[in-house]
Image (cartoon, rainbow, N blue to C red):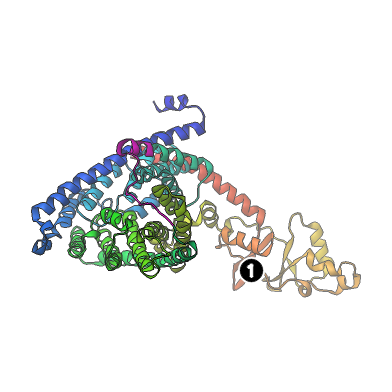
Amino acid sequence: MKTKIRRILPGESFRVLAIAACIGLMAGAANILFRTTVGLVHETIFVGGSELLGVAQGGLYLLLLPLIPLCGMVLLIPLSLLFPGEINGYGFPKFLRQVNLEGGIVRFRTIPLKILSCALTIGSGGSAGVEGPIAQVGGAVGSQVGQFFRVSGSRMKVFIAAGCAGGVAAMFNAPIAGVFFAAEIVLLGTYEIGSFAALVISSAMATVVSRGYYGGSPAFPIPAYEIVNSLIEIPLYSLMGVVMGLVAVLHIHVFYTIRDRFAALSLHPQLKPLVGALGLGVLAMGFPQIMGDGYHYLEEVLAGHGVFWVMVALIFLKIAATALTLGSGGAGGVFAPALFIGAVTGGAFGSAAHSLLPQYTANPGAYAAVGIGAFLAAATHAPLTAIFLLFEMTGNYLIIIPIMLSSIIGTVVASRLNPDSIDTVDFSRDGIDLHEGREISVMKSIKVGRVISEDVDFISEQANVDQLLTIFSMARDSFYFPVVDESGRMTGVVSLQDVKSILHDEELRLSARVGNICTRKVVVLTPEDNLHTAMALFDAKGLEEIPVVEAEDNRWVVGMLKRREVIAAYNKEVLRRGISERVAPVSSVSAE
């Protein structure tokens, strides 16, 4: 059947785009299933539980509020026991590891498990979002399609990213934001035109499915946006970008600190989410806005109806609530909490600015809208996603300049204070830099000792220049020659450039010693260095060859490394990996 399908589809590029369209349709359908499941759980546990316990009546009944998120975490226990390691906590970093480091093989069961576990957490009031999980669900759909067609590792990444783009686009009704989410966050900015086209097709098709079912409205309405006075407000938005960067760093620090504390807690793993839910419930007794995704209160803030001191308090309480929910083992994402924190931070900033300069500033809701994108950009280090998300939600071109300034400034401030986004902290702890890119990772994987030429012409530092010229004339492709002392250790390097000044002086050629004209300050490598280090030296120093010695303190020359041999080794390794990637998905599917 698979062979027949391949024969029917004309051309590789067309096949990729057609498959991407199918992935988008399936991601859109998965989004409907996800949102419906979360809604049903919310109505059953949160709404039904609130009515049953009488929480809405207030007073002493509020003391029963923690029982609602506690109920959701109790229902999560059977899933976490049946599928250990696949249910609890913030799972998006693990997903990025699967996509970028482990061949992109995502099991089918990820789809129902992610939907059900997140629905139980968020539907019972846990402070988390569905946007990251829907990206994982869409990515799992793309992975399943890639495994079905047994594609290469690089093509598998494209299909997974297409699924992620479709999921996010359908969730927000924002196809362009979905594309940039997949390109910036999932593919880490390392994408080609062909893969970008697949993301666009998938995102568009998923949005068609979502709009057909839910209509054309965005995830939450953003009121009309305007700039009252550009000369006053543009500097204010820039200053707000700095504030967003600082709050984003605080958010990331608190999130991982609390998660680490729960990890170190000497308590049964199944009980930790219950503790987190209890802590969330206690905070929510005073500020129920922090429960769930918080979109209902977010709409109030965007309309400019938020109270200043309440919004300030909610900044810190939502940060704590999200860390308690996900850090303790609840399931969900950080996208919706980031939107909430950004909105209340922007709303509080706008409220203060409007109080001081009422005639020159817009409604605080405008600052809340820009704050959504600015904080999202600062927390995820993905400014393009934030910019286009806000633009698509408002449909107002006037918001572009404020959101561009705030997002870029917020991202720069956050990345300067903390180089990791909320998704990459675990990778840095493991010594992994996901943003290095394919070329650098290949170069770093090859040791200099594998590439050096051991056929080296040495020359004694006591030799005269005439003897050196004889060696030059006999050399086939070398430009530099190690100069050694009596013990055989390198003391310098000599090249034709070093003897140019005395070539026409016969007396000097006979009397001058190589040790007097050679270059003593020599750039060297050891066999344990990698080719990335070597190429950096080639480029920085403008060299074509570098001596390779046993060690920095033991300069016994073991060979010469040539630039062209580095390039040849890199090309060979890329070819080898390309062949391996085509074989790996087939083996993985067969194994399962």
Q: Which of the two residues, 239 or 457, is positioned nearer the viewer here?
A: 239
The image quarter in which residue 167 lies? top left
Q: Residue 407, image x and y in percent?
A: 45, 59
Which residue appears at 61% of the width and 59% of the height?
535
- Quarter of the picture holding the C terminus: top left
Which residue appears at 69% of the width and 62% of the height?
542
In the image, taking residue 53 as reference, residue 249 lies left or right, namely right
Which residue appears at 90% of the width and 73% of the height?
507
User: Which residues are drawn in magenta?
Assistant: 207-226
- Quarter of the picture holding the N terminus: top left
Where is mark 1, residue-wise? 556
Residue 11 sits inside the magenta stretch: no
In the image, taking residue 279 as reference, residue 173 lies left or right, namely right
**551 w.r.t. 12: above or below:** below
What secondary structure is marked by label 1?
A: strand
In the image, taking residue 83 as reference, residue 139 lies left or right, namely right
Q: Which of the two residues, 523 or 245, is positioned nearer the viewer here?
A: 245
Q: Residue 348, image x and y in percent?
A: 34, 65
Q: Amino acid at mark 1?
A: Trp
